[in-house]
Image: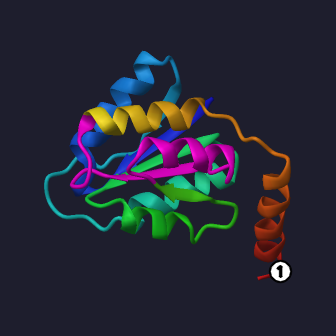
Amino acid sequence: MKVALASDHGGTNLRKEIADLLNELNIEFEDFGCDCEGSVDYPDYALPVAEKVAAGDFDRGILICGTGIGMSIAANKVKGIRCALVHDTFSAKATRGHNNSNMLAMGERVIGPGLAREIASIWLQEEFEGGRHENRINKMTEYESKH
């Protein structure tokens, strides 16, 4: 598995925690920043990472900002992306198992590093269940291809 990782200025500390987790899990990743203290625009980080995941350059992506909301909205503008905003472990498991999410968004101002690591770990290791969920994913993919 290869993961793309990015944050805006509101998520730099949590991004470093997730980078450490990826190293501990021996998961290949590329960190797309930001490495700044000043305010930046989250679409400048979310969109390029989402495009790389959609293109197949990366299997999954993790985005972090203050709330995770902006990053998830921006990423979901890219065709083929299913970015889930997650702040609890149940949703981390469900979004992979049921929604086959290929991107995860979290908010540094919402959750702490311990919970974020647990969420990311679950999300990275959970498999898509397929079955009845596959039809639902196919409906979204079909809609995307028409619009």
Quadrant of residue 116 within the rendered picture: top left
Nearer to us in this view, 77 or 36: 77
Is 138 rendered above or below residue 13?
Answer: below
141 relative position to 30: left or right: right
Numbered label tally: 1
147 relative position to 48: left or right: right
x, y percentage for residue 73? 47, 70
The magenta segment is: 86-113
Q: If the image is split into quadrants, where does the N terminus sit?
A: top right
Q: Amino acid at mark 1?
A: Lys
Q: For mark 1, what is the residue?
A: 146
x, y percentage for residue 80? 70, 61
Nearer to us in this view, 52 or 88: 88
Nearer to us in this view, 98 or 48: 98
Is 22 rendered above or below residue 51?
Answer: above
Q: For the point 18% across and 64% down, which residue is it?
A: 39
Quadrant of residue 140 within the rendered picture: bottom right
91 relative position to 99: left or right: left
Residue 94 within the magenta-colored segment of the rendering: yes
x, y percentage for residue 33? 34, 46
